[in-house]
Image: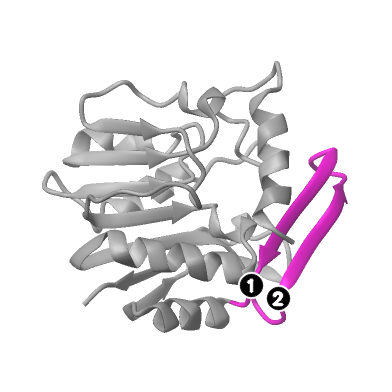
Amino acid sequence: MKNAEALTFFYNMSHSKDCNPQSVKLAHNTDYTDIDAEFVLQYADKNTSILDIGSGTGLIINKIYDKVKSIECVEPYAEFTKFIAKSDNITIINEDAFKYNTTKNFDLVSLFGFIQYMSEEEALFIYKKCYKWLKQNGKIIVKNQFAVAEDVNVSGYSEEQKTEYYAQYRNIDKEVNMLKQTGFKNPKVTDIYPPKANRWNNTHFYAIVAEKE
């Protein structure tokens, strides 16, 4: 799979007449963004500048923006970002991650529910960009579903989503090694959600935190 295939899925979602803040939660009737927000705030405070890639409708951003110094949100679809809180410390960039660039450096880069929509080659490209954008000793947080054994590729019609859906859930150890390959140090894997959040036997939600030395 390629990211372009996944982007089509989210483009269609963002342009739906039913688009709302919860649209980006693909597991219907579940929202663990309170846990996501609490996790981010373990690594952030009023002095922290954050770059959030794949911000979606801002479900996490809206829970943490008043507790950090600043957040730059990168999300290609303005139809999603219209739901993000309006605040002087939030900057919204409607651009996809491959085209986005900046001369800024951040204390923290967060990718929540994002990297699974990249092929391995594309993910490495994004990780290298993130490494460049981090300050020395800055951290990256990568959270989504990862394969517990062999990589899991999803390509085709999804009964749950009622449309074509594409994702690549790579083995968690492979993803950690990809971050190491990029230059990140001291990766830590956290089993972030309660057991009921993990609905499939071959994938599991984890958060990986690593740092730039």
Q: Are marks 2 and 1 in contact (CB under 8 Å)?
A: yes
Position in image of residue 126 (x %, y %):
47, 62
Q: Which mark is residue 39?
A: none
Q: CA distance from mark 2 to mark 1?
A: 4 Å
Disc 2 target residue:
151
Q: Amino acid under label 1?
A: Arg
Residue indicated by mark 1: 170
Q: Judge from the rendering whether residue 202 lies leftward or rightward of residue 22; answer left or right.
A: right
Quarter of the image containing the N terminus?
A: bottom right
Does 57 appear above or below 110? above
| Residue 152 sits inside the magenta stretch | yes
The total of numbered circles placed on residues is 2
Sort mark 2 into few (<14), some (14-19) or many (20+) by Cα contacts within 10 Å.
some
Residue extent of the magenta highlight: 147-171
Residue kind at label 2, given as amino acid type: Asp
Specify the quadrant of the image occupied by residue 121.
bottom right
Position of residue 133 relative to residue 97, above or below, is: below
Q: Is residue 52 visible?
A: yes
Q: Where residue 67 appears, x then y in whole percent?
A: 20, 39
